[in-house]
Image (tube, rainbow, N blue to C red):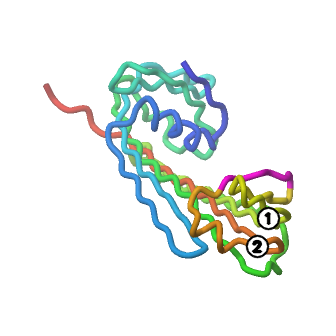
Amino acid sequence: MHRVAASAALALALAFAGNALAQGGAVVTSSAPGKVGVAETIKATATITAIDKANRDITLKGPQGNEMTLTAGPDVKNFDKLKVGDQVALQYVEALTVELKKGGGLVVQRREEVAKVGAKPGAQPAGAMGRQVTAVADVIAIDAARQMITLRGPQRTAEVRVRDPEQFKLIAKGDQVEVTYTQAVALAVEPVAKK
């Protein structure tokens, strides 16, 4: 059983959902000269099996029996309306784009933006959260024999293999790479189907 504490737990929860609760999803990839992107959408349904009101913990069980516990932060509205047996629908989108910036010129930095929205008072518990992290890194070395580039970002330096030979040919020392990682999650309580 996993334990996640904080309202940002939804993003982490859906990483779990992608592996353990997933019922269906789609992966989309795109490529253009100097730009590559991949996005994945995951939909899952889980059942609330336990609620600890004092600690605001909710235990969810997926269709294959996997369980995880979430702690609902203060931004989770209508917590008191949750009940054991409620079905929770999760939808999670994760996307990554990498774009070559020829000649550089951008500030090497990391930015993060977070947006949240919750259910209106009195409505069924629901919410959505989005997070986007953008980082710019300098290309400081190229190893053509291994098809590797060395990137120096705002927090660390890393070697990255560029698997597409056509994309690799476009990269030169002094260029920059901008990486954007996006997560979005929606969660809603659904009525239990009548038997």
Residue 96 lies within the magenta run: no
At x 46% / y 66%, what residue is drawn? Answer: 30
Disc 1 is placed on an element classified as strand
Q: Position of residue 83 (x, y in %)?
A: 40, 27
Contact, mark 1 vs mark 2 (Cβ under 8 Å): no
**Residue 195 falls left or right of residue 125:** left
At x 57% / y 23%, what residue is drawn? Answer: 2
Q: Which residue is mark 2?
A: 172
Callout 2 amino acid: Ala
Predominant SS along the magenta part:
strand
Mark whose residue sits in front, 1 or 2? 2
Residue 158 lies within the magenta run: yes
Q: Position of residue 47 (x, y in %)?
A: 37, 27
At x 67% / y 63%, what residue is drawn? Answer: 179
Q: Which residue is mark 1?
A: 137
Which quadrant of the rendered structure holds the C terminus? Answer: top left
Magenta stretch, residue numbers: 155-161
74 or 24, nearer to the observer: 24
Q: Position of residue 97 (x, y in %)?
A: 58, 64
Q: Confirm whether residue 121 shows in the render.
A: no
Give me the C-alpha separation between circle 1 and circle 2: 13 Å
Q: Quadrant for residue 104, please give it.
A: bottom right
Q: Confirm whether residue 136 shows in the render.
A: yes
Callout 1 amino acid: Ala
Identify the mark nearer the N-term, 1 or 2: 1
Dot 2, how many residues are within 10 Å of its Cα: few (below 14), some (14-19), or many (20+)? some
**Residue 48 falls left or right of residue 180:** left
Q: Quadrant for residue 113, please give it.
A: bottom right
Disc 2 is placed on an element classified as loop
17 or 99, nearer to the observer: 99
**Residue 141 falls left or right of residue 127:** right
